[in-house]
Structures are given as structure tokens and as C-alpha cells.
Amino acid sequence: MNHDNGRKKRNIPGECTVRRVCPGYLRVRARVCVCVCARVRMCLRQWISMRWEKRGLLRTVQGHESVQGGGSPRGRRQNVPGPEEQAERKPAAAVAGGAPAPNDAVNLERRVGLISGVALIVGTMIGELCYPPPPLFPPFPPFFCNMHKPTPPTLGALCYVELGCMIPSSGAEHTYFMTAFGHLPAFLFAWVSIIILKPAMLAIICLSFSKYLVEAFASDCEPPLTAIQLLGALTIVLITFINSYSVTLATKVQNIFTAAKLLAILIIVVGGAVRLIQGNTQYLATGFQGSTASFGDIATAFYSGLWAYDGWNNLNYVTEELKKPYTLIDSRQEITPEPHVLNTLIDSLTDHDSTFGNRVLGWAAFLMPLAVTLSTFGAANGTAFTSGRLCFVAAREGHMVDVLSYVHAKKLTPSPALLFNAFIALMMVIPSDIGSLIDFFSFTAWIFYGGAMLALIIMRRTMKDVPRPYKVPIVIPVIVLVISIYLVVGPIIDSPQIEYLYASLFILAGLVFYFPFVYFKKSVPGMGHLTTFFQLILQVVPTDTMPDA
């Protein structure tokens, strides 16, 4: 017994000694772990550099690092021509070829042909006819407004034809604001569009797709909100993967789903014509019921219709990737009025409590939810395609972080910009409040459409000698500018809503980021290491020249 007690007493000092040396032991172990991690990171970087050197891309990456470490880490790179320089070139030189310059290792290529370009416009516009109207706006606007819905988009499309032919650069309004007004208006447009408008539009379409798809399997009860949100999130991930993997795959998906929705439209047109021939015109006689002469109500009634027609300017976001830019952009003026036929037929053949499928197709009414599902998926694919290009162009001009202007080394897709757009869209899927998202979009979108019209009017005086393959009469942009001012100011004067204040404050909030990071060209500490990290993980590299160079 005493012997055991002695052993315990002898063990107590030993245990105390171990505790005293424990902190030093932990410090040594921490240093070893740091050294091992640094060694693993260095080996990983050497391995990736060896792979890139075999592909001939190491020179481009090193050249970019020297630019980043040089005098101007923000803004357009020295050998990237801006829209002003491109606008001064001759049209024949701007569209010659279709491949990157010989001395450029990586670039976006011209892979959008005539059919794909038409499908990009038609697929997006027709898909948006399926969305629910905002709750703050009349769900069935007056018949007068319904008949005049195509007028602003058609006139605006004619103006965008001239802008796209005059300035053969991607980015649409961002590029036109840069050319006419300078960096600040272009940055504010990119700030609102990339952070809110484009991701919100993608979230709305994917939520609509998931809602119609879930309702097809839950016809007897209201579909659960969680299922709609999860399916919408998976749809965003799938569409982002398609667009990041291959431009050719994305355009093929767009073509297939556009052909499917055109077939559905043919069924609607034939069925509607048959019903009209049979004498079912009672709803046309009541088309002016509920009309109002209020200054603001007419503007808000137009909002829901103009939301359904949005997408007519999508082709200008991908001008640099069009095989025949002038042929495609010119074809827009014949495409824009097309969805009006579909919208008018549906409104004239149905009442507020019945759907078009049940009234016209009878037992084949299940085809309508299927057609809507296909239509929304194609529209989501086209929206993701153009949204990534806007983010890519804005980052190339120094209005976003540099890594968003990189393209995949092998696939030649702007995968960082696509992933960034998808990330914000996934955040917007969580609340799933479609109505408030549409309210915000409808108000702010026409602010920028009006700005594009003003840019066109200004460039008629400041860029008189620039070749214009197509020239719209000057009265048309003036009319669209007046309509834009009316659509923005009218609802605010007649019935102020808190959403309008939020939209205005968010636009002005962009000034907080513009002056330090764009105007004064400041950079966040550690941004270079973060850019290198994403560059290694995503296998993306910067582009030196644009396809028109």
C-alpha cells in the first residue's frame, strides 16, 4: 500500500513537468504545420504552372501579373481597345474573320451564328410571357395598354440596331454609356445590373420554371415552397454549368428549347384562331372594362406588359461573339413584335378565372404547363448567357474585380462571371418573392433604357463621322426617351411606393465603391493573392485583345 502511494507521488511531479513543456511543444507543432502547408501550396502551384506551360499559357499569366504589379491595376489594360476606338474602325475590318488575333493565346471566339442569335432574342422574350405580373400592378391591364405594349420595345429595338452596328463591342448599355458619358454612368449601370437586375431576372425565371414543374406533379394541392426553392436553385446550377462548360452547348440548348416553344405557340395560334372562327369573341367586347385615365395607373399598367417583352436588347450584350454582327442585329427589327400575337390571343380568349389550356385544348390541357416549363428553361439559359457577358465586359473595363474578366483556358467561356451571377441568383431564390423582384426591375430598367436613347442622341453630334450601316430616324429615340421618362416619373407622382426609394438609394450607393476603387484606382489588400487563388482553382486566364482587334 505504501509502495503504491509512493509511485503515485512520484508520478505527480512528472505530470506537472509535461504540462510545463506543453506550450512549447504546441508552438513547434504549429510551425511544422505551417511549413508543410506552404510546401504543399508551392508544389501545387508548380504543378499547375507546368501544366499551363505545356499548353502555352504561362506567358499570358506572367504578363498579367506584371500588369497587376505595375502602375494601373484597375481599368482597361493597355492593349485592349475601348469602344471609342472600335467605333472609329471601318465595319469591314471590325467583322473580318471571327477568330481571335494570332498573337492572342486566349479569347472569346465568334461562335454565335444566325440561328443562335435569333433564338437568343426569341427564346428570352417568349419565355417572359409566362411570368406572373407583379402584385402591385394590374394583373390584366386595360385593353388599350395591351394593344400598345409592343410599341416601346419595337422602337427601342430599332435604336439598338444603330447602336450595335456603330459600336461593335459587347456589353450593350454599359458600352454605350462608356462611349457617350464616361465611366460613372457605365459603372452605375453595371453596379445595378450585375448585383441586382440580372441575377434577379435569372432567379425569377428559374422560380417560375420550378413552380410550373412542381405543379405538374402536385395538381391536387399547393406545391410546397421548399420544393420550389430547391428545384429553382438546382436549375440555376445546371444552367450555369451548361454555359460554363461550352458556348456551343449553351447555344444548342437555346436553339432546341426555342424550337419547342415555337411549336407550342403554333398550337396556341391555331387553337385561338379556331375559337375566334367559332364566334368566341365575347371577351374582346369587354376589353375596355376597368380602363382608367389616371396619369400613373396607365404607366403601371404598361409595366407588366413591358416586363413580358423584355429581352429585345439581349443580342447587344454578345456583339463580339456574333459571326455576322450586322446581319443578326438588323434582323432584330423583324423579331421584336412577334410575341404580341401570342399575348393578344391569350388575353382575348380567356377570362380571369380560366386558363388557356382548359378553355381551348380540353383533354390536352397538360401540354400548356409542359410548354411553359420548356419556355422558361430556355429563357433562363439565354438570360444566364447574356448576364455573364455583361459582367465580363464590366470587369474588363475595370468596373468589377479583375478575375471576373478572365476566361477558361480550355473552354474559352467567361466562367468566373457566370459563377458570380449564379451565386447572387441563388441568394435571391431563398426569399422567393417574385413580385418585389419584378417591381424593382421594371422601375430601374427603363431608367437605363432612357439613358441608352439619350446616348444615341448625343453620339449623333459627337460621333458624326463614325460609319453607321443602319441609321434610325432621330425622332424614334426621342419618342422612346419621352416614354422612358413617363414610365419612370408617372408612377412616382401618382402613387409613390417604397420600392422606388429603395431602387434610387441602391443606384446612388454605387458611388461609395466607384470613387475609391475605379476613380482613384485603389485596391483591397490581398486582392492579388485572391485573384491568383481563383485563377488556379478555376483555370482561367486574362484576355489580351478583343475579337475585333
Image: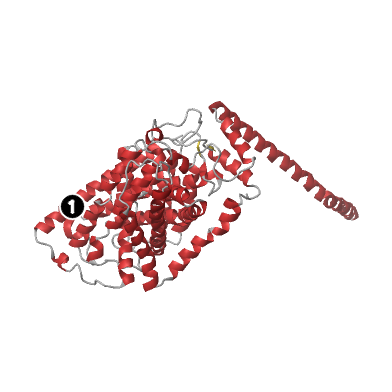
Q: Tell me residue 295's x, y (percent).
A: 32, 71
- Provide the residue designation for mark 1: 269
285 to the left or right of 11? left
Above-or-below relation of 86 to 368: above
Of residue 249 and residue 541, the one placed in the foreground of this image is: 541
Above-or-below relation of 226 to 35: below
Above-or-below relation of 376 to 241: below
Residue shown at the point (25%, 60%) measured from the top left = 148
Residue 377 appears in the figure:
no
* Residue reaching furthest to the left: 278
Q: Tell me residue 185's x, y (percent).
A: 48, 55
Q: Three-letter amino acid code at disc 1?
A: Val
Q: Tell me residue 464's x, y (percent).
A: 39, 45
Query: Which of the image's four quarters has the N terminus?
Result: bottom right
Of residue 21 and residue 496, the one placed in the foreground of this image is: 496
Q: Secondary structure at mark 1?
A: helix
466 to the left or right of 537? left
Residue shown at the point (63%, 50%) measured from the top left = 524
Which of the 4 quarters of the picture holds residue 111?
top left
How many discs appear?
1
* Residue reaching furthest to the top: 54
